[in-house]
Image: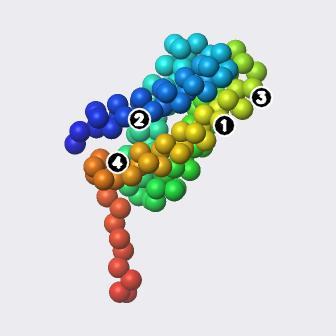
Amino acid sequence: MNHGKAIAVKGIMTLVVLYLVLGLGFGISFWNVLLLTVILGVISYALGDLYILPKTSNMTATGADLGMAFLVLWLLGIPLTGLDAGTMAGAAIISALIMAIGEYFFHEYIRKKDYGTNRRYETSSDF
């Protein structure tokens, strides 16, 4: 499986969103945005795209990615950026909501390319 292309697409999408929101909107340095992008990308690709998505629906995986992005950005953003918890929570929710929109379409790409590690099995109702 060619995960490199999928990770690159996700990484670029995440970096652009985080730089626009966190970098330009909240004055967070590019290096901190890059670090958050890498950490979030690794966690969300492994957990959301390769584990949750193949076992559930796109909406469920998108919701999980939204929650995961919010928590990672908020909890790691506070010590990294020096922003207070409330400001960082606002920045994290804005970022997570925008990324969730992109994630929905990214999940369609992942499913089309069949990059998931586990296939979703349809169960028969002939019991």
- Crowding at dot 3, Cα within 10 Å, few <14 / some 14-19 / many 20+, comes out as few
- The numbered mark, 4 or 1, whose residue comes first in the sequence reads 1
User: Which of pointers 1 and 3 lies earlier in the amino acid sequence?
Assistant: 3
Residue identifier under label 2: 10
**105 on left or right of 64:** left
Q: Quadrant of the rendered structure where residue 90 is?
A: top right
For numbered disc 1, what is the local secondary structure? helix
* Residue beneath the point at 51% across and 49% down: 62
The residue mark sitting in front, 2 or 3, is 2
Q: CA distance from mark 1 to mark 3?
A: 11 Å
For label 3, the SS is helix
Question: Where does the image place residue 7, in percent across and percent down from the top left?
Answer: 35, 34
Q: What is the spatial separation of the Cα atoms under label 4 and label 1, in whole angstroms? A: 24 Å
Q: Are marks 2 and 3 in contact (CB under 8 Å)?
A: no
Q: Give the residue type that dot 2 points to.
A: Lys
Give the quadrant of the C terminus. bottom left
Q: Is residue 104 visible?
A: yes
Q: Is residue 6 above or below residue 107?
A: above
Q: Does the rendering let one see residue 117?
A: no
Q: Which label's residue is closer to the chain start, 4 or 3?
A: 3
Residue on which the image places disc 4: 110
Q: Is disc 2 surrounded by few (<14), some (14 to 19) or many (20+) residues within 10 Å?
A: many
Q: Amino acid at mark 4?
A: Ile
Residue toward you, 38 or 19: 19
Any mark on residue 86, and which?
3
Measured from the top left, where is residue 87 in percent x and y?
75, 26
Q: Which residue is mark 1?
A: 93
Residue positioned most to the left: 1
Disc 3 marks a residue whose amino acid type is Gly
Q: Alpha-carbon distance for marks 4 and 2? A: 10 Å
